[in-house]
Image (cartoon, coloured by chain):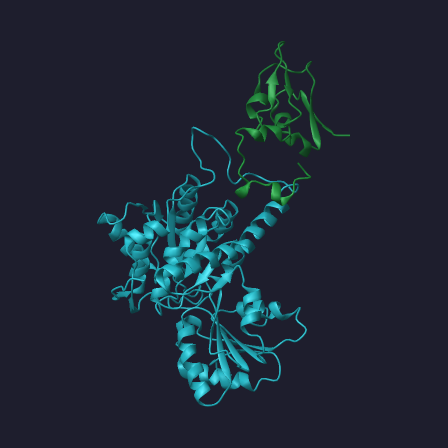
Amino acid sequence: MAKRKRIGMEVALAAAEAVGMCNVDVAAVYPITPQSHIAEHLSDLVADGKTDTEYVTVESEHTSMSVCIGASATGARAYTATCAQGLMLMHELLPIASAMRCPIVMSVANRPVNAPLNILSDHSDIMPQRDSGWIVIFSENGQEVVDLTLMAYRIAEDKDVMLPVIICIDGFILTHMVEPMEFPDQKEIDKFLPDYKPYATLHPDKPLTMGAFAMPDFFPQMMKAKDMALLNSKKTIVKVWDEWEKKFGRRYRPVETYRTEGAEVILVTMGSMSETAELGVDELRDKGVSVGLVKIRLWRPFPSDELKAAVKGARILAVMDRAISPGTGGGPVFTDVKAVFYGEDSRPIIVNYVMGLGGIDVTVGDFVKMGEKAAKAKKEEYEFYGVMG
Amino acid sequence: MAEATWRDIFPGNVVLTPGSAKEYHTGGWRSLRPIWDNSKCIKCGICYVYCPEGCVSQDKDGYFMADLDYCKGCGICAQECWTGAIEMVEEG
């Protein structure tokens, strides 16, 4: 493997640089904090002629996704990015993109959803999109954003997948951080990511129908086909990540572990908090607490088997949610993790800490406190960590 | 096609044959059927103009009829007819 130069760059700009290397045909991006630097920098790359992309300056996120679906249907490689209210406005179109099997790639700069208005960081914007049929992948740092973005079209456009992909990048905590990272050469990416070969395209010379009407005799089959496609996509995702590891040396897994060997308590995290949690685990281990960390990278399709294997032998799981699922008594990751263990003969005690809402910092010390607290848990618990009263 | 399994469906529910919606007979949705009384018909064609399905046509004598494969029984033709020549009758 060639030794590459590491450069310092703001992660949002790096995300745009990575998109610029993917030979995207159509980008329709409406700026919204904290995604704006992606929209702006990609626009710069197009204006400077560094990428041959048609950049459509739309008037809303509903339109940006509509443009992407239309472009994708004609066989174009399409990209967009958004977050929070923009993602909520797009919501209506997300299940259409996945049902029409449009391999669009979208960066989401995770930000809280109103109200109250807050532009910082948490996962409450992506959670309402869980059931839209998209592949959803979380990143921890700038290098992962670059790598996962560069791999996204390979996964999305694979004939065994043909589904849109969201790359989650925690707002500000990641998007606005200047981090060291390395980029592959354009030639390597051109080889890794060949031109998109769609299975069907809208073209006046050969008319066909996409997104057709379906009555009850067809509709359930359609839903099953879509679900099977998403469940099956995991094989391809892992295959592409394996190929990346061989070529570029960095390894990605649906569920990743840190010091889980023999751990009695396992913290479960997602997104940028995972790196902070690693330091918390180090501190806890130094104190003699038997703690490990499991990081969920692939949120949809949910990696149930990988999660079971990763936490095998642990007595307590502490799930850290950066969002709530109101009315369920916990966060969305908590609910999914619990569901994985329902059918098991022996189940760990699963506790839930909802933390980091609205962009509040979650420090190494916080993970130490949560880890120590979880180690004493006798039964299932759910709390808003750090909320008084 | 009621017996189609999920595996039979082309990815994305793409329909490769253009104009195939014609094969789907929306007339099956109908609960009321338009019946023309040609003795009251003045052959003005307003039923033809207003039919949202475009399923009303004119015969060689100038009278009108609905293609029951596609008529959904909405009753707009009966509502608009000047002379009350169209009656909506329940499907039996």
Q: Residue at x 62, y 25 (%)?
A: B77
Colour assigned to chain B in the rendering is green
Whether A256 is drawn above or below B87: the answer is below
Q: Residue at x 27, y 63 (%)?
A: A4
Whether A90 is drawn above or below A203: the answer is below
Is residue A337 in sight in this rendering?
yes
Report the front residue among A124 and A295: A295
Q: Considering the image in quadrants, where does the N terminus of chain A appear?
A: bottom left
Report the front residue among A65 and A75: A75
Residue B35: image location, x then y, percent:
70, 22
Whether B4 is drawn above or below A326: the answer is above
Q: Residue extending furthest right? A: B92
Residue A17: image location, x then y, percent:
29, 56
Q: Residue at x 53, y 43 (%)?
A: B12
Residue A234: image location, x then y, percent:
51, 57
Q: Residue extending furthest front? A: A1
Report the front residue among A59 and A342: A342
Residue A197: which quarter of the image? Answer: top left
**Chain with colour cyan in the figure:** A
Residue B78: which quarter of the image? Answer: top right
Whether A303 is drawn above or below A222: the answer is below
Residue A368: which quarter of the image? Answer: bottom left
Q: Residue extending furthest left? A: A48
Residue A96: image location, x then y, percent:
50, 47
Is residue A82 in sight in this rendering?
no
Report the front residue among A287 and B39: A287
